[in-house]
Amino acid sequence: MSQVEIYHNPRCSKSRQTLQLLQDKGIEPTIIEYLKTPPSTAQLKDLLLLLGFQSARELIRSKEEAFKANNLADEHDEDALLEAMVQHPKLIERPIVVNGNRARLGRPPEAVLELFE
């Protein structure tokens, strides 16, 4: 089996539930606390591809203060959106589970289980 990773925020209940769900299935993922070690722009682009998302906007938490403070609702440049997520990792939707060349957002947590079917 390929290495499983979870982009995790331990303060987020959905992230904790997703991690617990994986562990209950006997999967011990590499935990990436993305608030402490934010992904690079290139890593975010890779995640978007793995998730099958068309736009960085699909990975942004629009209710975060940094979203409003940086006027991201009016931003249409993909690179600017990605850079905002690098600078303000709280903007990154969570949790993201990666298994090989596929990824899923753990919203709801059970959505990540299809990576292991």
Image (cartoon, rainbow, N blue to C red):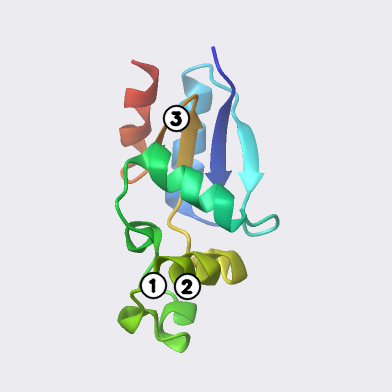
Asked if marks 1 and 3 touch (Cβ < 8 Å), the reply is no
Q: Secondary structure at mark 3?
A: helix
Residue to which mark 3 is pinned: 21
Q: Residue at x 36, y 79 (%)?
A: 75
Q: Is residue 105 visible?
A: no
Which dot, 3 or 2, sits closer to the camera? 2
Q: State the mark number for residue 77.
A: 1
The disc, 1 or 3, on the residue closer to the chain's N-terminal end is 3
Label 2 sits on what residue type? Ala
Q: Residue at x 55, y 45 (%)?
A: 7
The disc, 3 or 2, on the residue closer to the chain's N-terminal end is 3
Label 3 sits on what residue type? Leu
Q: Residue at x 44, y 30 (%)?
A: 21
Asked if marks 1 and 2 touch (Cβ < 8 Å), the reply is yes
Tell me the quadrant of the picture where the C terminus can be found.
top left
Label 1 sits on what residue type? Asp
